[in-house]
Amino acid sequence: MSIFFFNEDVPLPVFSKSKISKWITRCIIDENHQVGTINFIFVSDNYLLEMNRQYLNHDYFTDVISFDYCEGKTVSGDVFMSVDRIRENASDLELNFTDELFRVMIHGVLHFMGYHDKTDEEKKQMRAKEDEALKKIE
């Protein structure tokens, strides 16, 4: 039961792994869930594009793909994130890269806890939950 950080074809972004692990854990507990095993895997646009094609039949770039292995209230899964896409989105939105990175990380975890973003209402709720979680980073 832990949170792990990996990278495939890009350098691992620089941030405090222990601080972010504590933050993710707190967010999960605050949602009345338990932490299982969560893997954050940082990859390139092309790597995630191939995953999007292979596993989701989508032929477009994305910033995150999550694979849910949750059992009951135990939150477990793999969160693959494109560092390229996050950097570009941060630039387009005039945001700090690290802030956008953390938003994408918690976005993947929120999916594991049952939050979705297909409809406008779901997107609004997801964004509110992301904002709420981001305020908890110490």
Image (tube, helix red, strand yellow):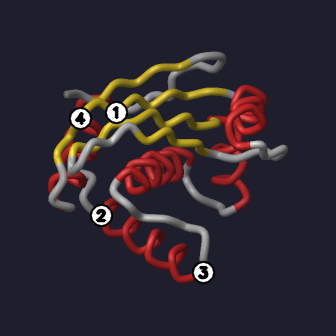
Mark 1 Cα-neighbour bin, 10 Å: few <14, some 14–19, many ≥20: many
Can you give x and y, in whole percent of width and height, for residue 61 in the image? 77, 44
Tag 4 or tag 3, which sits nearer the N-term?
Answer: 4
Can you give x and y, in whole percent of width and height, for residue 34 in the image? 17, 45
Against 81, residue 43 (above or below) is above
- Tell whether 125 sits left or right of 81: left
Tag 3 or tag 1, which sits nearer the N-term?
Answer: 1
Q: What residue did someone put label 2 on?
A: 135
Mark 2 Cα-neighbour bin, 10 Å: few <14, some 14–19, many ≥20: few
Residue at image coords 41%, 74%: 128
Quadrant in the picture for residue 69 = top left
Residues at discs 4 and 1 in contact (Cβ within 8 Å): yes
Looking at the rendered structure, the secondary structure element under dot 2 is loop
Q: What residue did someone put label 4 on?
A: 36
Alpha carbon separation for disc pair 1 and 3: 27 Å
Quadrant in the picture for residue 43 = top right
Residues at discs 3 and 4 in contact (Cβ within 8 Å): no
Tag 3 or tag 2, which sits nearer the N-term?
Answer: 3
Against 65, residue 44 (above or below) is above
Looking at the rendered structure, the secondary structure element under dot 4 is strand
Q: What residue did someone put label 1 on?
A: 38
Tag 2 or tag 4, which sits nearer the N-term?
Answer: 4
Q: What residue did someone put label 3 on?
A: 120
Against 123, residue 86 (above or below) is above
